[in-house]
Image: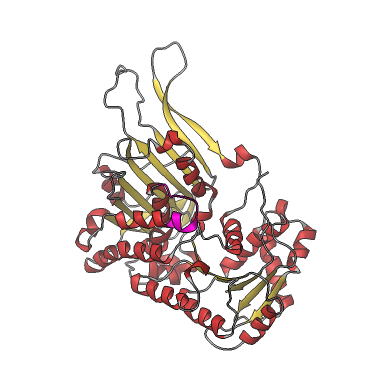
């Protein structure tokens, strides 16, 4: 079993307490950590929202969510009832004054508690909620504020949010969460590189031909259609999740695991990204939008039908782009990034393809020569696979084929391990910001993304169609194949 390090007693206030994120992710994560006795029963989970509910009504809602989203094997009846006993609710208006005195009064019952305030709300409420928390005296040295992505929709709005929150709290108490950074495999990137010299000595342009990062989703826009049609895949996925993965892959070794030491190195990568000027956006990016198709044999509607739109939309549900890091380690190594909805399956993976041998000693009939690849699987089953060339067994001559060395975390460690939100919530209580984004990270990422958005606006072409159940528009395939490379489609 992995060691469970207990955390101090806390009062976790979740704004947006009746929303999907809270019900589907936050409450199950807190339940799992309570069931494993990682935090004491003196802790409290306090829901805050505009919905007219009392404590008992909210506990019933929470129990329904836990029974729906926690696997039956993990749902212990006694632990569930004990956990629900920690759950409270206060009706609060994030933009007004209603409900705040009752919330603050509840918190003042235990002034010694760590106070994480999780803002599972629209980003335009981050500033108003933080100002009210300060105005009602709810913030102090043991307070932390957690901000969900997206932090703004462009550089200007990101700065506005950061400024508003920064006026009432120091940077050390602001936790900008990206749940991808809490995934086991993502954290293992640093262990893979900096605890294993065999890999770190290969981790540079002399040995690596190119890198691919793919985040594919089976689902469409669903209930997020209103938000998504204003955002699109570039804002929703690339600016945060995918650029964070790129940073962990490309960064230099930090001097320690101290939060700022790690984040300093990530910011250096973002600053080293070759800018894509507006007039170059069409050369290095591809936008797509799904049309009707089929996934796993089941028909699914197109983007416009999902949103009930009668007129065309220029919002992309797929984006592929070619990025480059201007540094000695990575000069000349392209990073191909892509993400999309309504793709054949849910999958997040990273592929590092190594350079081919400069000369082959094997005869032409030794077919099957392929470059070595390191595949890092983030979901659905976290693990790693190193593909290398081996001789095919048998007396029929020398034939080569790729063979994989696999590490599945679940199979290797033989246990359920905490999901991203479980780990990140406990880090918030500890005050450990290593896996959270700093203000300059967010703003530097937007500085790189904005010229691409500007280029799309200046050249407002319709996104290229792709059938639901495919791997995106053909233009994305052409983009990488122009460089003599191809997308790696599957770990199977």
228 above or below 251?
Answer: below
Is 430 on the left-hand or right-hand side of 78? Answer: left
The quadrant where residue 119 appears: bottom right
Task: Give the residue drawn at x 30%, y 54%.
Answer: 272
Which residue is most to the bottom? 97
Q: Which residues are magenta?
A: 253-263
In front of the other: 114 or 210: 114
Task: Give the residue drawn at x 53%, y 48%.
Answer: 380
In front of the other: 375 or 330: 330
Number of numbered callouts drawn: 0
In front of the other: 278 or 13: 13
Residue 243 shows in the view: no
Task: Give the residue drawn at x 49%, y 74%.
Answer: 122
Q: Residue 294 location in percent, x, y?
A: 45, 52
On the rendered image, what quadrant is the N terminus found in?
top right
In front of the other: 2 or 285: 2
Q: Residue 117 location in percent, x, y?
A: 58, 72
Q: Residue 261 location in percent, x, y?
A: 44, 55
77 above or below 488?
Answer: below
Magenta stretch encompasses residue 121: no
Is 277 on the left-hand or right-hand side of 352? Answer: left
The quadrant where residue 104 appears: bottom right
């Amino acid at each position: 079993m992995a060691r469970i390090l207990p955390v101090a007693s806390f009062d976790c206030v979740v704004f947006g307490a009746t929303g999907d994120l809270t019900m589907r992710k936050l409450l199950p994560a807190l339940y799992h950590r309570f069931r494993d006795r990682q935090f004491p029963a003196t802790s409290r989970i306090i829901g805050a929202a505009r919905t007219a509910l009392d404590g008992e009504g909210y506990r019933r809602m929470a129990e329904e969510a836990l029974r729906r989203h926690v696997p039956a094997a993990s749902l212990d009846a006694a632990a569930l009832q004990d956990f629900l006993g920690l759950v409270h609710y206060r009706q609060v208006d994030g933009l007004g004054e209603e409900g705040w005195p009752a919330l603050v009064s509840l918190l003042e019952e235990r002034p010694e508690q760590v106070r994480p305030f999780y803002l599972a709300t629209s980003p335009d409420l981050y500033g108003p909620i933080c100002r009210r928390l300060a105005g009602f005296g709810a913030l102090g040295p043991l307070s932390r504020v957690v901000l969900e992505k997206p932090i703004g929709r462009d550089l200007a709005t990101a700065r506005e949010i950061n400024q508003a929150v920064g006026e009432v709290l120091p940077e050390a108490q602001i936790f900008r969460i990206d749940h991808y950074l809490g995934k086991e495999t993502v954290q293992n990137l640093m262990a893979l590189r900096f605890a294993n010299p065999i890999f770190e000595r290969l981790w540079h342009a002399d040995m690596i031909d190119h890198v691919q990062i793919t985040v594919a989703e089976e689902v469409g826009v669903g209930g997020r259609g209103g938000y998504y049609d204003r955002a699109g895949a570039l804002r929703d996925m690339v600016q945060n999740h995918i650029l964070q993965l790129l940073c962990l892959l490309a960064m230099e070794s930090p001097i320690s695991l101290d939060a700022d030491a790690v984040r300093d190195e990530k910011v250096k990568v973002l600053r080293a990204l070759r800018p894509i000027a507006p007039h170059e956006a069409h050369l290095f990016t591809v936008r797509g939008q799904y049309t009707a198709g089929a996934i796993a044999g089941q028909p699914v509607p197109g983007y416009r039908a999902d949103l009930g739109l009668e007129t065309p939309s220029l919002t992309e549900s797929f984006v592929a782009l070619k990025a480059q890091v201007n540094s000695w380690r990575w000069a000349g190594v392209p990073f191909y990034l892509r993400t999309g909805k309504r793709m054949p399956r849910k999958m997040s993976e990273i592929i590092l393809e190594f350079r081919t041998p400069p000369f082959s000693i094997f005869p032409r009939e030794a077919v099957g020569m392929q470059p070595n690849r390191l595949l890092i699987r983030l979901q659905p089953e976290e693990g790693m696979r190193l593909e290398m060339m081996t001789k095919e067994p048998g007396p029929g001559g020398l034939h080569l084929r790729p063979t994989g060395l696999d590490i599945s975390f679940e199979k290797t460690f033989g246990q359920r391990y905490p999901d991203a939100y479980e780990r990140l919530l406990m880090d918030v209580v500890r005050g450990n910001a290593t896996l959270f984004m700093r203000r300059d990270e967010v703003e530097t990422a937007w500085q790189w993304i904005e010229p691409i958005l500007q280029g799309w606006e200046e050249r407002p072409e319709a996104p290229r169609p792709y059938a639901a159940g495919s791997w995106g528009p053909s233009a994305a395939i052409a983009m990488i194949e122009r460089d003599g490379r191809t997308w790696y489609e599957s770990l199977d």
